[in-house]
Amino acid sequence: MSDTSIIANKLAALLSEDEIYVGRARIISQSGAPTPLAALLNEIDATVLERTLVFSIDDVNVSMIVAGRRLRGLVDVSGNLPEAESVIGKVLSRDEPETLQAAGDLMMLLCASASQVTVRSLPSQPFGTSAEAGISAAGLAKLWHIDLDAKPVALIERFFAAHSNGMTAYLYVSNGDVAKTVGDVAMLDALWSTQIATFRKRHRSVLPQQEGPRLICLNEPLGENTTVAVAIDGNDVGLFSYKPSQMPKLVSAWTSALG
Amino acid sequence: MVVDDLDALQEKFAACDTIAFADLSTQMILVTNSASSLPREGLDNLCAEAALTMGTKRQQFLGTEPSASAVVASRGQVRLFLRAKAEPNDVMCCVSSSDLDINAFLADAQPLLERLSTGG
């Protein structure tokens, strides 16, 4: 990286108010908020001068040439993904709908369950011809059916959607209302209506410093061979029963989702 | 010595920072591994969290019976609580980073807890 780029990055960090950096990369999406692909398109929309934007989507790096708030094309995708082969090095154009769709499919694949997306802005590199302008961020959003202003899906809701195969039943409560149930939730519903409020009140009183998002997995809380887990994130609560063998996997998924 | 057993368990599972043997009836941590970085207040909180999540003979906050074990996962940290089968007030508490092999730890920790609880 040139001295100019280092200074530019440091200036950007100093000027930012709420931005968080990991090394030299700026976090644009964490734990699904904002939606990873919308965050990425918004970065493209904010890039006027020609730059190479390197997005780190969890452990995959995607390098794009961006100019004039338009994505010109992808120059590199780490990890030898077969889905990237038909896209790397191609200038995006409405005259090449298959490449455009392949790029969209690739980005949706990478961003679907990404827990963290960061961006670095590097000097541009030779790519295509000046006549090939690429596609605007707004145009890509329309083509790929991405709502740039979409409200991010809540942490617990995303967790349930991605890991319900390890659960036998679940109940999702958002802002005090039961928003979704799957499976036999009679026991979970009873716990929700009789115990959770008291538990949370007691928790706030005894452990006020541990009020962040958390997952509590209990073994045999209702007698032998029973399991219950409670996920808490602000005003959202999720209760689920799970297969005991799946507990370590669910805990790992939860901590990954928290980033 | 109990501390040697806790140290040996912690050495085997380096992701663990603190492994403690506690009594839920008095809500007191009795012994920790010697390399634990938790201050006294942190140990008190750990014991309080064990009682709150697993429940005690006197009070249940989650469920209808005292849980056999509990795992609490928060950002970057996992806390595990195990109850002795012979003496339900005896518990083992563990504070670990999120990369702990939970199944392997539980397989080693439960027999150790039973041994510590029965004074063996």
Image (cartoon, coloured by chain):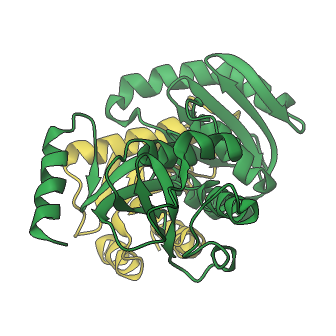
Chain colours: A green, B yellow
In terms of depth relative to the viewer, which is nearer, B33 or A60? Answer: A60
Left or right relative to B96: residue A115: right
Give the mark count.
0
Left or right relative to A33: residue A209: left
Q: Quadrant of residue B32?
A: bottom left
Q: Quadrant of residue B84?
A: bottom right
Q: Residue at x 22, y 34 (%)?
A: A17
Q: Give the percent coordinates (x, y) of residue B57.
A: 58, 36
Q: Residue at x 45, y 55 (%)?
A: A117
In terms of depth relative to the viewer, which is nearer, B93 or A53? Answer: A53
Q: Give the percent coordinates (x, y) of residue A22.
A: 28, 58
Q: Residue at x 71, y 63 (%)?
A: A96
Q: Residue furthest right?
A: A184
In terms of depth relative to the viewer, which is nearer, A92 or A1? Answer: A92
Visible in this render: residue B25? no
Q: Give the percent coordinates (x, y) of residue A225.
A: 80, 53
Q: Residue at x 63, y 34 (%)?
A: A147
Visible in this render: residue A52? yes
Left or right relative to B55: residue A258: left
Q: Give the percent coordinates (x, y) of residue A115.
A: 52, 54
